[in-house]
Image (cartoon, rainbow, N blue to C red):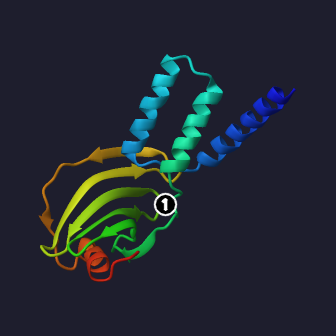
Amino acid sequence: MIKTIFTFLCTLLSAFLYNQSLSLILPEPDRKKLDSIVMSMVRKNETDDNIRVVIANFKLKYGHHQSDDWDYISSSVSANKYYIKRLIHNSNISDFWVKIISKSNEYSIEHWKIYCNSNELVIFSATDYSAQGFVKVSEEYTETPKPIIPDSIADSIRENVCEKPIK
């Protein structure tokens, strides 16, 4: 009897966690990790409930809602809106995420690092999403730092993250 109640509660909890995790977005590297984990579980014939629990726990730990902790920075002439989050800042380096939202609510999330003293920028990755939150394109880059163009959106972001860091 107790085992049946426990199993029922675990199933109910896993369904709840899975539903809560559906609206969360994973950055591309984390999505690839989750895909690998799920494929391994499928090959091992894990139950659907076990797979759902792993997906829910992973997304709850590494995912984010579209509006979580994003600070507005600027808008472009084409009406794109720029936001940043997860800023790590020391005296010379700011490492953070940039979200660019278009008028049609499609958006991109990019991983940037700005070297404040040398006024240079590196973009490590970019993932484009549909307005519904589905990944359209995802790319990773291995570039060297490039100079930031004066009076550009990147320059506006540099001013925010280097001169008055957001915590």
Quarter occupied by the C terminus: bottom left
Position in image of residue 16 (x %, y %): 70, 43
Position in image of residue 9 (x %, y %): 77, 37
Please state if 13 lies on the left or on the right of 134 as rendered.
Answer: right
Visible residue check, residue 25? no
Q: Residue furthest bottom?
A: 164
- What residue appears at the point 82 percent right and 27 percent down from the top-left corner? 4
Please state if 77 lies on the left or on the right of 37 as rendered.
Answer: left
- What residue appears at the point 44 percent right and 33 percent down from the top-left corner? 35
Quarter occupied by the N terminus: top right
- What residue appears at the point 39 percent right and 63 percent down from the top-left corner? 100
Position in image of residue 166 (x %, y %): 38, 76
Name which residue type carries label 1.
Answer: Asn
Estimate how packed mark 1 is, as few (under 14), some (14 to 19) or many (20 or more) residues with alpha carbons within 10 Å. Answer: some
Which residue is identified by label 1? Answer: 105
Give the answer, above or below, for where 55 lies relative to 81: above
Res 99 → quadrant: bottom left
Give the answer, above or below, for where 93 lies relative to 62: below
Visible residue check, residue 7? yes
Res 164 → quadrant: bottom left
- What residue appears at the point 46 percent right and 48 percent down from the top-left corner? 26
